[in-house]
Image (cartoon, rainbow, N blue to C red):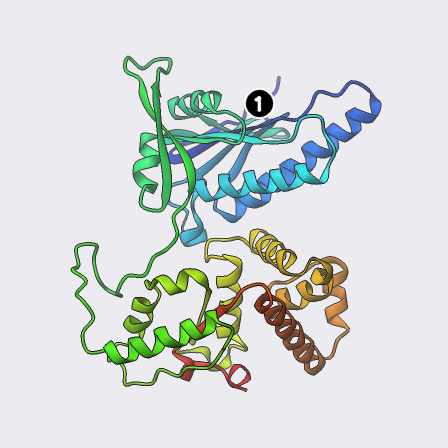
Amino acid sequence: MTAQHTHLEKKRATIVCADIGIFSPRDDESIDQSAGLMNTCNDIIESVAGYYGGKVIQFTGKSTILAFEEKNASVGNRNNPLLAAIEIREKIAELSKKVSLDVPLELLAGIHMGPVLLGHIGTATNKQSTVIGETVDITARIRDMANKGQILTSKETYEQNKSKFDFQTLEPVYVKGKSEPIPIYKVLNQKKKEFAPKDQSDRSIYSEMIGRKDEKEILIAELISLTQGEGGIINIIGAPGTGKSRLIEEIKKERIVDQLLWFEGRGLSHGHTLSYHPLAGIIKSWAGIVEEDSPLIAESKLKNEIKKISPEAVESIFPFIARFMGLNLSGDAGKHFAEIEPGALDKMMLKALRELLIKAATRRQFIIAIEDLHWADQSSLS
C-alpha cells in the first residue's frame, strides 16, 4: 500500500496555459531533434517564468501551465505574467530562427486570474506540482481560442493590466459551465512610458510653459543645424525648480525632433560611486531596454541594435558594451574579461562606446540628453 501525500492550498493566482508547435517526429533523427527542442523550450519557459515570479506547474510535451501567485513580493514589480508570456514568445521565435523546421515554432497562450488550489500531489517519493480549479479550466479554454503567436486574456487580466499594455477586444466566447460568453482580449504590446510630472495624479492639469520662449527658440535652432550636419554641445544651467526638465520635455514635442534620434541618460543623487551610470542609461534608451526586462531580453535587445548599426563589428563591440552596462556575460566572453586588467578594461569599454556612437552617427543624426549631470560620477564627467 502506497501512502498518498497531497497538499493543496487555496490561493489567488494568474494562470498561463501555453502551447508550442513542436513537430511530430517520424524517425530516430527527428526524435532526437524534437526532444532537444522541447528541452530548450522548457528551459526558456522555466527561466523566464521564474524571473517574473511564476512557477512551472506542468510540462506535457508541447503544453505548459504556469502559475503566478498574486502576492509574490520576492520579485517586486517584475511579478507580471503578461511580460513573461511576451518574453517567452520572443525567445521561442528567436530559437525558431536558429533551427531549420518545416513549420516554425510559435507560442500561443491563454491567461486568466482567479482562485485556485495550488500545491502538490503524489507519494512521498514522487510528488508533482499541480493547480486545480475553474480558473485553470477557463484559462485552457482561452488558450484553445488563440492562433499561433497570439496571447489572449480574460476580462479580469485585461482590467488589471490595461494601463500598462495595449489590447485588442475580440468576440466573446462560450466556456463550459458559464451561461454567458466571456470577454476575450488579445495582448498587443507593452505601453511605452510617457513623461508626467512627478508626484502628480492622472487628474493633473498640465499648464502651458511660460517664460522660456527664448531658450526654446535657441534649442530649436540648434536642432535645425543638427539636421543639416552641424553638431554641438548645449548646457542648460539653472537652480532646482526653474524648469530645465520641463523645457526638455517641450522640445521633445517639436516636429524637428521626428527627424532625429533621441537618447536619454540621467545622473542619480547617489550616483557618484556608480561608474558611467548616465552613459549606461543612454545605451538602454537607444536599445529600448526597460526596467522590467530580464538580463536575457536586455542582452538580446542590445545585440540586435548593434547588429543594425554595424553587423561586421558586433562581435568586437557587443561584449564590451554589455559589460559597460553591467550585464554579466557567460561562456568564453565572461572568461575573457576575467583575464583583463581593470584599467585596460575601462579603456576597451570606452573605445567600444566611441566606435558605436561614431557608427550610429553615420546612419542618422541623434541627440544625447543627460539630466542632472552634476550628480554624475567622475568617470562619466571625464
Seen in the picture, residue 373 relative to 301 is either above or below; the reply is: below
Determine the residue positioned at 39% across, 83% down.
235
- Crowd class of label 1 (few under 14; some 14 to 19; many from 20; radius 10 Å): few
* Coordinates of residue 77 in the picture (x, y in percent): 40, 53
Q: Quadrant of residue 59?
A: top right
- Which residue sits furthest front? 228
Horizontal and vertical percent position of residue 273: 50, 81
Q: Secondary structure at mark 1?
A: loop
Residue 112, x across and y down, in percent: 39, 30
Q: Is residue 206 left or right of residue 116?
A: left
Indicate whether 50 appears above or below 144.
below
**Badge 1 amino acid:** Ala
Name the residue at 37% across, 43% down: 165
Query: Which residue is disc 1 drawn over?
Result: 3
Most foreground residue, 9 or 357: 357
For the C terminus, give its image quadrant.
bottom right
| Residue 339, x across and y down, in percent | 77, 73
Q: Nearer the viewer, residue 364 or 165?
A: 364
Quadrant position of the N terminus in the picture: top right
Q: Quadrant of residue 155?
A: top left
160 and 217: which one is in front?
A: 217
**Going 59% across and 26% down the picture, which residue do you hit?**
123
Q: Residue at x 77, y 30 (%)?
A: 33
